[in-house]
Amino acid sequence: MAHIPEDRHKDGLILEYSLGENLMLKRYFTKDYQNKGFINFHNVDEYTNKLISQYDIRSGNGTKTTTRSMSGGNQQKAIIAREVDLDPEILIAVQPTRGLDVGAIEYIHHQLIEERDRGKAILLVSLELDEVMNLSDRILVIYEGKIVADLKPEEVTVQELGLYMAGSKTQITSEVSAHE
């Protein structure tokens, strides 16, 4: 399982670390990148440069760039590269496009759809209804701690979804339970 956190600065990156160090946070201890506590910098550089190229992460000094100095979109791409490259069966994405420009949003949506198409389970948690409608195969609406609707995006409007979210509308409880 992998996780794209809501707050990339607080929970997704160590801003004082370099891009390369942040990309390695979940791999530095594996046998490919260290031996008896000694880091294999050649393999680390090879791997991080591969991710930078593959995910189009733009930074002034490549792997040596301090993550704090990168744009929000490139910081988010770094998190997505690190998490997706773990090849998880489940990817939890919480507010993955919050505060990003249109280009970065499109790129991140493309990556999430690509993972879904590869058979990965994506749990998308987002306040952006358009994002939920465009990326989801199935939408579960939670109101006051209970699932009140299990919807297909192509069968519901944004307005109707809003009614479920506000608690003004619910599906029959047994109907929701049957899908769980």
Image (spheres, rainbow, N blue to C red):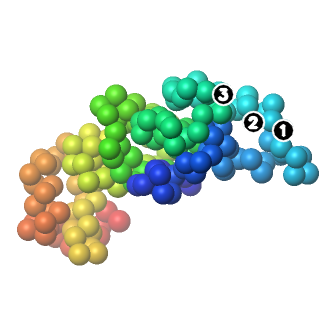
Residue at 35 percent of width and 65 percent of height: 180
Residue 115 point in image, percent of width and height = 48, 38
Residue 130 point in image, percent of width and height = 21, 43
Secondary structure at badge 1 equals loop
Q: Is residue 119 visible?
A: no
Location of residue 48 by image quarter: top right
Residue 31 appears left or right of 170: right
Amino acid type shown at disc 3: Asn
Residue at 80 percent of width and 35 percent of height: 41
Of labels 1 and 3, earlier in sequence is 1
Label 2, label 1: how far apart the Cα atoms are? 6 Å
- Asked if disc 1 and disc 3 are in contact, CB closer than 8 Å, the reply is no
Amino acid type shown at disc 1: Asn
Q: Is residue 143 above or below residue 156?
A: below
Location of residue 51 by image quarter: top right
Q: Is residue 29 above or below residue 20?
A: below
Residue identifier under label 2: 44
